[in-house]
Image: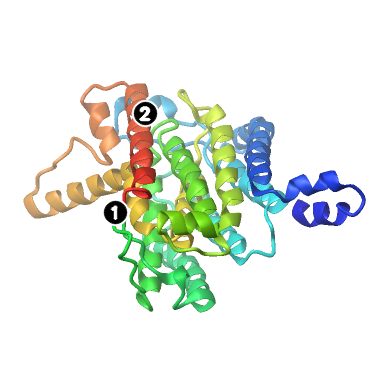
Amino acid sequence: MLVWLSSYLQQFHSSFAVFQYLTVRSILALLTALLIALWIGPTVIRRLQILKFGQEVRTNGPQSHLSKQGTPTMGGVMILFAVTLSTLLWANLSNPYIWVALFVFLGYGMIGFVDDYRKVVRKNTDGLVARWKYFWLSVVALVAVSYLYWLGHDTNATRLVVPFFKSIMPQLGIWYIILAYFVIVGTSNAVNLTDGLDGLAIMPTVFVAAAFALIAWATGNVEWAKYLYIPYIKFDAELVIFCTAIVGAGLGFLWFNTYPAQVFMGDVGSLALGGALGIVAVLVRQELLLVIMGGVFVVETLSVILQVGSYKLRRKRIFRMAPIHHHFELKGWPETRVIIRFWILSLVLVLLGLVTLKLR
């Protein structure tokens, strides 16, 4: 929005041209989202308290979590508002990738909102019926990826980039839709599973979003894409704004979500952020790299799959409790130790993922 305004104002004063630079707009998008989250945070928390939108805690979980009963949830709405407004202000709105990213982000946020609302109203942890939840998650993902396939099929936009191999970039064809669907839906649920401790999910999300901002810039730049042997996609550069807005909103939310949390993001936040990371990975053609950089999310998801599978087949549990962050809690680790160590692992994995862009 402000890109168009600054372009118009350039005829009156050349200094407005600074707002055309992607680096300037990305920093401003981050700061805008951060300030919005910090500004509306206290109001959102008070409103959630008045509405009695408190967290329902599982009675079969770690006993230390019982003190979290009643802590306001659905705080992810401040993330949705901050990211959306910041992106609309600083992104070039003629770019179709921006609208696709916002469509998935807000669509998943709405599904999460319904899920959270049902949990709050019914005072249980079931929320939206699983089959309907996955149905609507699938609808949003398939609409987005079908449009993207129509927009860029048989071009660089539908190639698969394989980490460590610069000469392997197969054209996916119709398999692009299938891969993209599983990446978006899978990532949204992976972030959702990780969101079990104060601040545990938001910092890995911030780390991955920051890395994707760099990758989007490189993918949308002809020279850097050629230098790194990654496909050049002309619409990708503008995704830097969306990614930095997530970074800013995430840091703003962490201000209130850090231990002991004043508010939880709920499914409205975790599903939206997971969907956002998934769609960005698809748009920059780095689905496999997301597995490396989002390794914490992957491990959390695998721990649940292994736990359920082992119990059904052998009637034995592998972990004391799944997702795996609860396993470490039940082993005696303080919650803050689990959180910080997972943050450190996430940062290391993101750095390793970025290194693979050159080691190809």
Q: Residue furthest right?
A: 12
Q: Quadrant of residue 330?
A: top left
- Mark 1 or 2, nearer chain start: 1
Query: Which residue does the image show at 65% across and 30% down from the upper left?
Result: 42
Residue 27 at x, y percent in the picture: 64, 39
Q: Quadrant of residue 318?
A: top left
Depicted 127 relative to depicted 58: above or below: below
Query: Which residue does the image show at 52% across and 57% down from the upper left?
Result: 223
Residue 12 at x, y percent in the picture: 92, 50
Q: Residue furthest left?
A: 314
Quadrant of image for the N terminus: bottom right
Q: Badge 2 is on which residue?
A: 339
**Which kind of residue does numbered mark 2 sit on?**
Ile
Residue 92 at x, y percent in the picture: 69, 58
Q: How is the image coloured?
A: rainbow
* Left or right: 306 as drawn, with respect to 85: left
Q: Is residue 9 visible?
A: yes
* Left or right: 156 as drawn, with respect to 17: left
| Crowd rating for badge 2 (residues with CA inside 10 Å; few <14, some 14–19, many 20+) | many
Depicted 300 relative to depicted 229: above or below: above
Q: Badge 1 is on which residue?
A: 164
**Which kind of residue does numbered mark 1 sit on?**
Phe
Q: Nearer the viewer, residue 20 or 83?
A: 20
Check if mark 1's residue and mark 2's residue have beta carbons within 8 Å: no
* Left or right: 271 as drawn, with respect to 51: left
Depicted 333 relative to depicted 116: above or below: above
Q: CA distance from mark 1 to mark 2?
A: 30 Å
Q: Nearer the viewer, residue 292 or 112?
A: 292
Local secondary structure at mark 1: loop
